[in-house]
Image (spheres, helix red, strand yellow):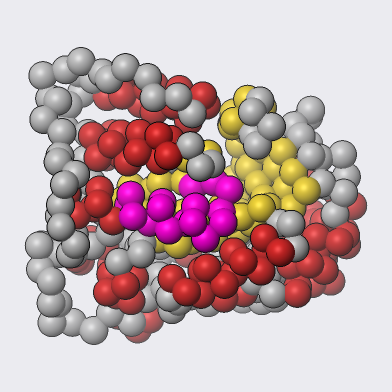
């Protein structure tokens, strides 16, 4: 893999490689679903996820494709509550909710503060509500929203990787110290935090991808997060396709995702989940894809390492790699 790209990775480069946005409507969330999740209480419960339509995130991370379902303007006050109200009509009985807005909930250009109170009223009766935020936007505004809520507030943040050089190239515009400071602030306020961890970002080979994902889980738990989600990096946003064509990125193998999930669960420091969306992108063997997917889902729900899938493709990547 190329270690020294001859192109500058910044907002301008990333945006220039994009395709078109999908058509969205400000009054309607661009998606919603219900999934089962092992909660902090140790129970497997249904969790609703609402994908809110709003303005594109101000941070243009190299690997992000969430901009595809955003607007290029700040939507009107009242639109976000209307979106939540619409989606909740399809989620009777759900007690846990994730509000994902393709960026940072506490970005005033995305979620108007004037909507906080109405959102809080809509969430009465829930046990937990989880929002996402860039670590540098964690401040007293989080407490303002928390104090309005009846359910417990939890906040998900992208740590991505603790490899400092790779993190810089991702255009995340933060350091691992920024992440640790954000977690510390939330912990002191008794707000649980979650970390998104990338599996094999650009400029890492398969072994290095596993190594740095594991080190990132270590860092996240040591910083004080309660839960980690491991996300295999994929192409499809323009910039990642460009890097893949240049030999600077390859998607990780599903075996690596298994290794990292087993490692995280084995730490017993908190819940660790594998992102199981569209795992066919990361498997070279159709014979065992369904079995591996089901195994990962079961481990997500039980936090127990279950027996490996037997298949002739079991040439798993090694993990005893040195620092990149």
In the displayed structure image, the side of residue 315 where residue 97 appears, left or right = right
Q: Is residue 243 above or below residue 150?
A: below
> Is residue 224 rendered magenta in the image?
yes
Q: Quadrant of the N terminus?
A: bottom left
Q: Residue at x 88, y 60 (%)?
A: 148
Main SS type for the magenta part?
helix
| Quadrant position of residue 188 | bottom right
Q: Is residue 306 above or below residue 169?
A: above
Q: Position of residue 42 (x, y in %)?
A: 64, 28
Q: Is residue 211 above or below residue 2?
A: above
> Is residue 105 rendered magenta in the image?
no
The residue nearer to you, when weighing 33 against 323, is: 323
Q: Position of residue 149 (x, y in %)?
A: 85, 54
In the displayed structure image, the side of residue 30 where residue 125 appears, left or right = right
Q: Position of residue 293 (x, y in %)?
A: 35, 26
Q: Quadrant of the C terminus?
A: bottom left
Q: Is residue 102 visible?
A: no
- Magenta residues? 213-228
Q: Is residue 277 above or below residue 171?
A: above
Q: Position of residue 207 (x, y in %)?
A: 16, 49
Q: Is residue 237 visible?
A: yes
The residue nearer to you, when weighing 183 against 256, is: 183
In the displayed structure image, the side of residue 321 where residue 90 appears, left or right = right
Q: Residue at x 24, y 40 (%)?
A: 256
């Amino acid at each position: 893999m190329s270690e020294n790209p001859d192109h500058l990775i910044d907002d301008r480069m990333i945006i220039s490689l994009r395709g078109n946005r999908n058509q969205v409507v400000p009054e309607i969330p661009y998606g919603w679903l219900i999934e089962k999740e092992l909660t902090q209480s140790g129970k497997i419960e249904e969790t609703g996820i609402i994908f809110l339509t709003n303005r594109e995130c101000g941070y243009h991370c190299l690997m992000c494709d969430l901009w595809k379902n955003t607007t290029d303007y700040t939507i009107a006050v009242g639109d976000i509550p209307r979106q939540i109200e619409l989606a909740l009509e399809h989620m009777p009985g759900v007690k846990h909710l994730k509000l994902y807005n393709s960026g940072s909930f506490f970005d005033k250009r995305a979620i108007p503060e004037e909507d906080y109170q109405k959102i809080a009223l809509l969430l009465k009766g829930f046990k937990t509500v989880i929002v996402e935020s860039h670590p540098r936007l964690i401040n007293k505004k989080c407490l303002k929203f928390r104090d309005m809520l009846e359910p417990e507030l939890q906040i998900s943040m992208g740590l991505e990787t603790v490899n400092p050089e790779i993190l810089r190239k991702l255009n995340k515009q933060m350091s691992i110290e920024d992440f640790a400071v954000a977690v510390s602030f939330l912990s002191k306020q008794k707000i649980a935090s979650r970390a998104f961890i990338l599996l094999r970002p650009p400029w890492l080979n398969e072994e290095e991808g596993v190594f740095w994902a594991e080190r990132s889980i270590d860092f996240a738990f040591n910083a004080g997060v309660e839960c980690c989600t491991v996300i295999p990096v994929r192409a499809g946003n323009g910039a990642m396709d460009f890097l893949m064509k240049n030999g600077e990125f390859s998607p990780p193998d599903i075996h690596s995702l298994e290794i990292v999930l087993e490692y995280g669960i084995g730490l017993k420091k908190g819940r660790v989940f594998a992102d199981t969306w569209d795992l066919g992108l990361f498997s070279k063997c159709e014979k065992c894809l369904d079995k591996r997917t089901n195994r990962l889902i079961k481990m997500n729900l039980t936090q127990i390492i279950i027996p490996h899938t037997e298949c002739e493709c079991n040439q798993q990547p090694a993990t005893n790699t040195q620092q990149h």
